[in-house]
Amino acid sequence: MAKKWLKAAAASIIAAASFYTINSAGAATETLMEVGEVRSTSDQAVVPVTIRNITYLMSGHAEITLPENTVSVETAQFTPSKQFTNNLFRTISNVEDSKLVIDFYSESPDAQQIKGGQAVIGYITYNLSDSFTPGKAVTLDLSAVSVKGRYNADVAVKELDGEIKNKMPIGDVVGNSKVTATGAMRILQHINGNFITEKEAFLSADVDADGILTQQDAMQVLDFSTGKRLTFLALAAKELPNGVLKSEYYEKVEARHGRAPYTFKKRSGTIPYGLKLNEQTGEIIGLPTKAGTNTFTIEVTDAVGDTAERSFTIGVVDSYIASVEKLYPINVKRGEKPNLPAEVTVTYKDKSIGKETVHWNEVDTTVLGEVTAKGLIGDTGFMVQATVHVVDENYLKNTSFGYFQMLNIYTVIVDVNPEVYSVTINGIPAHYEGAGQYSLASAAFTKGNPVIIQLYDKYGNLLETKSQKLVIQ
């Protein structure tokens, strides 16, 4: 009886091992079935279906469905990977309207061992119509997943839905809708002076998320195109602002190019005393209790287990200023001097508000991309920062204001260059009047107060943010 019980227990343990893998830290990792998140600017998108963190696999079932009444995206076909085409597995698929049904079975009476703990089951091809315009996205709903592992035991599986988005794939650069060595060559041409000026292409090329294009980006794109690199997951480079002793601090580090949700952890170094990293959101919050400069490394892990890391520095100063207004990003043409504010609004430790003069350091605007301008506030030791976008041309040409006295309504009119696809004013979409002009009339606008104008390209990328005081000449 004891022998029977031991044998059954051993079988259960082995079965459990078929759907749990152990990561380097020694923790169990749950099995995932993932429908890929794919970007495409062509008339088709090819989306992988992957199973991860599984040691033995006997069979499986999955259904992938487009949203109801979707007309711009059509399921064309499913192509099993080599591993799932009469090699180790037999795969059957069927497309019914907007739903794709996939079933696969081991060709052997026993479960197949999955090398490396993951395998691509196959690829779904979707046809994209002209109505699937730039910036649009559609969700691919994964449901009804059932998987069996060793000894035909049921495997608990976490489902990750997919997405198709009409945007340039990260690392594409040249508009091939895939990553190739040509993209790496284009980045090198940019470095040598043949600039990438379109915002979408620039963001696609900035694979390491540091705001500028370097040989590092070219190398990562080349490695991805040859299979040496499997992800572009990165933590965005960021100059974290100073903290003030015994004053509230809030900042956030952000992950790019991976699969949400993300988790964050401090890998090395020391975060200033009194501050804490929120491991779910990447927020750094708290009340600094010790002056000084701290450098630390944060690691991000995405939903499929890929990781990336970056080092950050926070200085904590003892100042009578508690906080400084958040400055909007500033656009400047390459080679020109950015128009940085001579004064900023500050909040003092006694909660009063005032203005302080800023002495800005020189800003290098010779290279397209994102740089950080730094300035000292008077003799306080407090450092203020502003993000400067170095661009090839101005997106905002002119702003004018009008006033209808009878209705007590102000009108904001903006003239923009052809790359601008939409405009918001104080977060409200402006009306396109034609010939590169947008306008918005509202009783909510107030004379003398600033209006926030934001310009976007056709993919939804923010091109420029401009704060202008509403003044009637």
Image (spheres, rainbow, N blue to C red):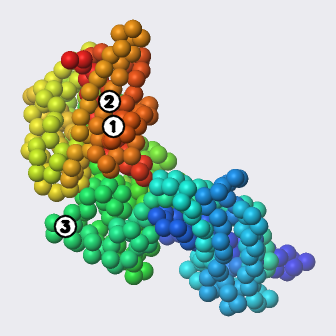
Badge 3 or badge 1: first in the primary sequence = 3
- For the residue pair 400 and 196, the one nearer the viewer reads as 400
Residue 248 to residue 295: above or below: above
Q: Residue at x 24, y 19 (%)?
A: 471
Badge 3 or badge 2: first in the primary sequence = 3
- For the residue pair 360 and 123, the one nearer the viewer reads as 123
Q: Which mark is residue 51?
A: none
SS state under label 3: loop
Residue 43 to residue 328: above or below: below
Which residue position is annotated with label 2?
Answer: 413
Q: Residue at x 40, y 23 (%)?
A: 441
Callout 1 amino acid? Gln
Which residue position is annotated with label 1?
Answer: 437
Q: Residue at x 65, y 81 (%)?
A: 80
Callout 2 amino acid? Ile
SS state under label 1: strand
Residue 78 picture location, percent across and down: 66, 75
Q: Which mark is residue 194?
A: 3
Quadrant of image for the C terminus: top left
Quadrant of image for the N terminus: bottom right
Residue 125 picture location, percent across and down: 60, 72
Residue 83 picture location, percent across and down: 63, 86
Instruction: Mark 3 vs mark 2: give the one in front.
Output: 2
Residue 254 is left or right of residue 341, and the answer is right
Residue 148: name its quadrant: bottom right
- For the residue pair 358 and 167, the one nearer the viewer reads as 167
